[in-house]
Image: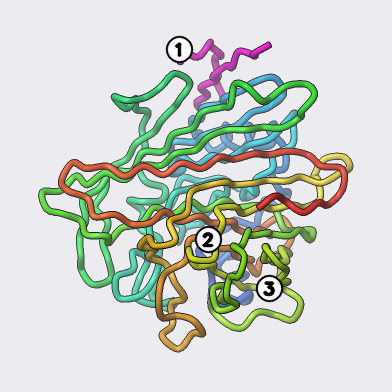
Amino acid sequence: MQRASSVTVGSAGISAAQQSPQALPRAPDALESVVFCLMSGCCREKKPMTTRSDLLRGLAKAGLAHTELRMGSSWLVVVPGLAARILGAGMDEENALWVAPKLVAAPWAEGGNAGGMRTWLAPELGPKGFFGPDVAGWQVPPALDPGAYSPTLPADAKPGWHAWRTSLTADAADDGKYPISITRSVQLDHTTTNADDPSLRFRFRHELSNEGSTVIGRRVGLWLIAQVPSAREGVITIGLRDGAATDHVRPYFTELPMGALLMERGVACLRALGGTKYKIGVRAAAATGSIDFEGPARLGSGRMHISLRFPVDPAGTYLDRPYSPLAVGSAGPGDAVQAYNDPRTGAMAFSEIEVHAPAYSLEPGQCQCFEIEVTVRRVLSPGRPSR
């Protein structure tokens, strides 16, 4: 039997249920991360937010409105004031996503890395980067994150979808300016969440619209980033096409630490454990359209598994690649999938699973959509995900 979903809208600690009508910046090294953390005050609350109750209390304390979608024991929470992030997702009380110990609607330079699943723009760095020309000049545009999202209902919206939209001018390092809007939408899967399958399944879609009067020519890329807990060791697994060349999987920043990456036929497995900074990217020609994270459950026994499934265009224009012209594999096509491990530890320890959409040439008023299927489930023992 199909279960009815419910929507809860909360604001400043007050919520009402109704039936649905349908951090911090990445520092160049661990020392800088610690110094920044102390300056911004993000570490004063050291307990990680591992549960739904933790998250709702933190949002109420920060005075941040939220929308909660529920179906049975499955739930997810979207916070419009924090870049419309999916800040919580899981079953029962457990939150599968990493959330900062303290929530604040502020720019990243003031401790605004909230965690969860967010939308950024590619390329990140370089001459045309939206976050600066290089690592030294890296900063998050406040118009993008935390942004100014508000609820919306697209004209072509189907029943069950919930959406939030923001408009901004994306400023590139080369002084390029692109008037755009971003819409983030979610829909719970109404057919697969049941008592025999304790999992959360939902569809996520983000849309990029050209709000200017001139063509945007393959210059702006949609980029989904999901932050996952890595205080205890987990693994990120990226599906690879048969015959993928070794140079299709490449490191960012520096060479990878010994034992951080395991390459097997059909998969690249990256160790996820706080304390060391590293990142890999996989070119579209090698990616199958899958990335998974699995780590110890934060409540009870077993392990928590998060999977993302998405389309990949091997011939598409992907914009993000290693930033330094001296980096191995920095030339050539960009990456469709990435995985990042942050140097922070304890309650601030997180890793990221990242998915890029190919960039398209958009006429004025034209929109690009990119959809991802997300599954969160508890598993009893480690297992190799499907490709």
Residue for badge 3: 276
Residue for badge 2: 337
Q: Residue at x 41, y 44 (%)?
A: 370
Residue for badge 1: 21
Task: Report how far apart the C-alphas of labels 1 and 3 lie in the structure.
Answer: 46 Å
Task: Report how far apart the C-alphas of labels 2 and 3 lie in the structure.
Answer: 20 Å
Q: In this view, does 99 lie to the left or right of 144?
A: right
Q: What is the secondary structure assignment of the residue under circle 1?
A: loop
Question: What amino acid type is highlighted by mark number 2?
Answer: Val
Out of 87 and 15, give the one closest to the viewer: 87
Question: What amino acid type is highlighted by mark number 1?
Answer: Pro
Local packing at callout 3 (Cα closer than 10 Å; few below 14, some 14-19, many 20+) is some
Local packing at callout 1 (Cα closer than 10 Å; few below 14, some 14-19, many 20+) is few
Q: What is the secondary structure assignment of the residue under circle 2?
A: strand
Disc 1 and disc 3 in contact, CB within 8 angstroms: no
Q: Which one is earlier in the sequence, the residue at label 1 or at label 2?
A: 1
